[in-house]
Image: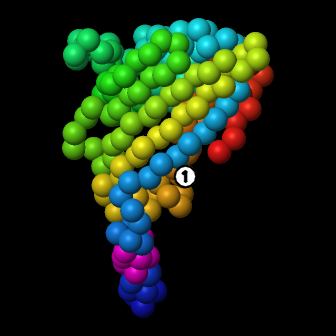
Amino acid sequence: MKWVIAAVGTLVFLLGGVYAVGLSLPQNHIAVRTARSAQPPESVWAAITDVASFPAWRSDLDSVERLPPRAGMMVWREISGNEGITYQADESEKPARLVTRIADRGLPFGGSWEIGIAPDGTGSRISITEKGEVYNPVFRFVSRFVIGHSATIDKYLSDLAVRLGDAKVSSSG
């Protein structure tokens, strides 16, 4: 019985610590990654704006649902498992810049991505800047210390490399 009380006490202490550290972390973060592709900007642009084909190359997605545009900009819902997140394009400058944001309210996180595509020799330089917000202190702790703020960008760039036919996208933080 003592070990059960000790185990429960330790668990409460650890969860309290995670919550306290999460409270001390800033709600907002910025993560930046830059990568190079052998493909020209137009090819990169075509891949990142063809939301209907995302499930074919993004390993973290099961499906995508196109939604009616808002203010002339594309809107879509990405489904992974039983979870769905709605995204909206806020700015679009073909083939150089795309700004998207999470359009759902009530999630424990939010934010935007700015994707810049610039010519780089015969290929492209792709820069992704995430301006993230993590509202829940426990999620904030996990985002910072377990997953890492740039994990989603890194996964996206890795999947994009496969989609573009690059052996890998060389990226840097």
Q: Is residue 54 above or below residue 25?
A: above
Quadrant (top left/top right/bottom left/bottom right) for the C terminus: top right
Residue displayed at 30% across by 15% down? 73
Magenta region: 11-20
Magenta-drawn stretch, dominant element (helix, strand or loop): helix
- In the rendered structure, does residue 4 fall within the stretch colored magenta? no
Q: Is residue 113 above or below residue 88?
A: below
Q: Position of residue 71 (x, y in %)?
A: 22, 16
Choose between 30 and 120: the one closer to the eye: 120
Report the number of numbered marks.
Answer: 1
Dot 1: few (<14), some (14–19), or many (≥20) neighbours within 10 Å?
few
Q: Is residue 12 visible?
A: yes
Residue displayed at 32% across by 15% down? 74
Q: Position of residue 81 (x, y in %)?
A: 40, 31
Quadrant (top left/top right/bottom left/bottom right) for the N terminus: bottom left
- Residue occupied by mark 1: 148
